[in-house]
Image (cartoon, rainbow, N blue to C red):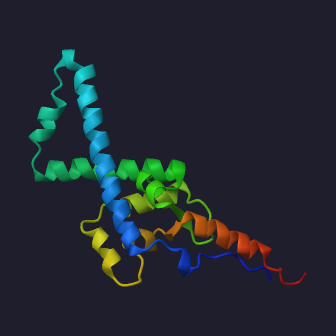
Amino acid sequence: METKYTIPNYILASKTTRALNFIIDILIMKLTIWILIIAADLIFSEYKLGIINRIDTFDKIETYLFWSIVFFLYYTITETLLSRSLAKYFTKTIVVMQVGSKPKLTDILARSALRQIPFEYFTFLQGRKPGCHDEYSKTFVVKKDKLERSINDFNELPKSGN
């Protein structure tokens, strides 16, 4: 019987690292969106779109919906293409499945959708339990270098039946 690799607890990113990822991602998203909005206003100035003025008039629900869409797109695009958000590059972490493989688009869509639940980020305060968007999408955020070493160590173990 062949033993499959599974993510060991010691390579999981710490709660501090996860919080840092969240803060960095928010800063990157806000900066990127404002640059894109300013650029669009300048490029299409002859059409007098007034995107900045329109966003400034958003009520609470419109603001929530706008940023929810931005969060969903940001995480879906970056984690689908790179297996990590941009903040995860700074913290040297990566999103993987339980066997250490890259998540499929459906897994990333689940993670991104679950992040839209109000106060979902507070689910990370439950001791050692994973947060909601990790638990239900069956994904893990791990230290990339530790993952690579762990997989190499696993592959070097003598296989049963040999």
Q: Nearer the viewer, residue 28 or 91?
A: 91
Above or below — where is 141 with respect to 162?
A: above
Question: In what quadrant of the picture does the N terminus appear?
Answer: bottom right
Percent x, y for residue 83?
53, 55
Q: Quadrant of residue 97?
A: bottom right
**Residue found at x 16% / y 48%:** 62
Q: Nearer the viewer, residue 58 or 152?
A: 152
**Residue found at x 30% / y 69%:** 121
Instruction: Count the numbered circles shown.
Output: 0
In the image: residue 73, left or right of residue 101: left
Percent x, y for residue 3?
74, 80
**Residue found at x 72% / y 74%:** 153
Above or below — where is 146 with respect to 110?
A: below
Question: In what quadrant of the picture does the C terminus appear?
Answer: bottom right
Q: Quadrant of residue 154?
A: bottom right
Percent x, y for residue 137?
47, 68
Percent x, y for residue 122?
28, 73
- The residue furthest top is 46
In the image: residue 75, left or right of residue 47: right
Above or below — where is 117 with respect to 2?
A: above
Above or below — where is 72 with respect to 152?
A: above
Residue 102 seen by the camera: yes
In the image: residue 73, left or right of residue 3: left
Residue 70 seen by the camera: no
Q: Nearer the viewer, residue 55 or 31?
A: 31
In the image: residue 1, left or right of residue 55: right
**Residue found at x 44% / y 54%:** 85
